[in-house]
Image (cartoon, rainbow, N blue to C red):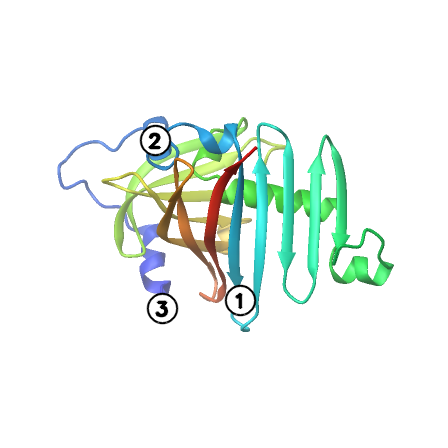
Amino acid sequence: MYRAALLLSSIVFLASPSGAEPPSAGQLLDRSIAYHDPDGRFLSQAHRLSFLETRPDGSDRQTTAMIDVAGGRFELVRRDKVEVAGVIKDGQCTMTLDGRSKFSEEERETHRLSCERLEMMRNYYTYLWGLPMKLRDPGTLLGEVTETTFSERDVYGLRVTYQEGVGDDTWYAYFDRESFALIGYRFYHDETKNDGEVILLEGEFEAAGMRLPKSRAWYTHQDDRHLGTDVLTALKAVD
């Protein structure tokens, strides 16, 4: 149902009603971060975030992530049919399955109990829930700001790529023109193939001195297929 509106964001560029020039990429990012995280807390303090993650097949999962960028810590607990937990601290990784630190190879494969998988989950949660703040990371290349539409709203669009060795995907982030709030984004592995996904953000969760998106819904570019919706249900700072 979002397909027609979302396709416009890739091809339609609108003139500003006021005739004013759009902000530079740096100005846009500064204003958006000032809206979402004015005191710079996400990258400097530890926070625990809880989510309800639902999928089109009717399954859902309760997930809690403790993200401590400055301290280099990450903790993840996922509960559906089983509980999978993992911790990264001081460069070390530990994982448990239903509270057990010993599990069979079959269990390891079935539930993807590896440090590589946990590191990927750390990067996933830290990056996505840390946007737009994470767009200041070293190696991030900010492109031109355009005036466009996204989900039937007039927005500023920002193209983001990464230096070699940092990231391979091309991202587009979309910001409300009045508040500079981040309202959605999309990514491509290969933009010429129209692969990748588009993510719509709805609502806000305000706590711990930050405004983070409350809900993010995922859709494929090629067939507008709904992949899932993640809802932030709790956010608090931790020691």
Q: Is residue 223 left or right of residue 80?
A: left
Q: What residue is shown with label 2?
A: 34
Q: Is residue 173 left or right of residue 73?
A: left
Q: What residue is shown with label 3?
A: 1
Rendered-image quadrant of the C terminus: top right
Q: Which mark is residue 115?
A: none
Q: Secondary structure at mark 1?
A: loop
> Percent x, y for residue 172?
42, 44
- How far apart marks 1 and 3 lie (CA) works out to 17 Å
Q: Secondary structure at mark 2?
A: helix
Q: What residue is shown with label 1?
A: 55
> Percent x, y for residue 24?
32, 28
Looking at the image, which is closer to me, 194 or 53?
53
> Percent x, y for residue 114?
76, 49
- How far apart marks 2 and 1 lie (CA) works out to 32 Å
Q: Please, what is the three-letter code of the amino acid marked with disc 1? A: Arg
Q: Residues within 10 Å of mark 1 (few under 14, many from 20)?
A: some
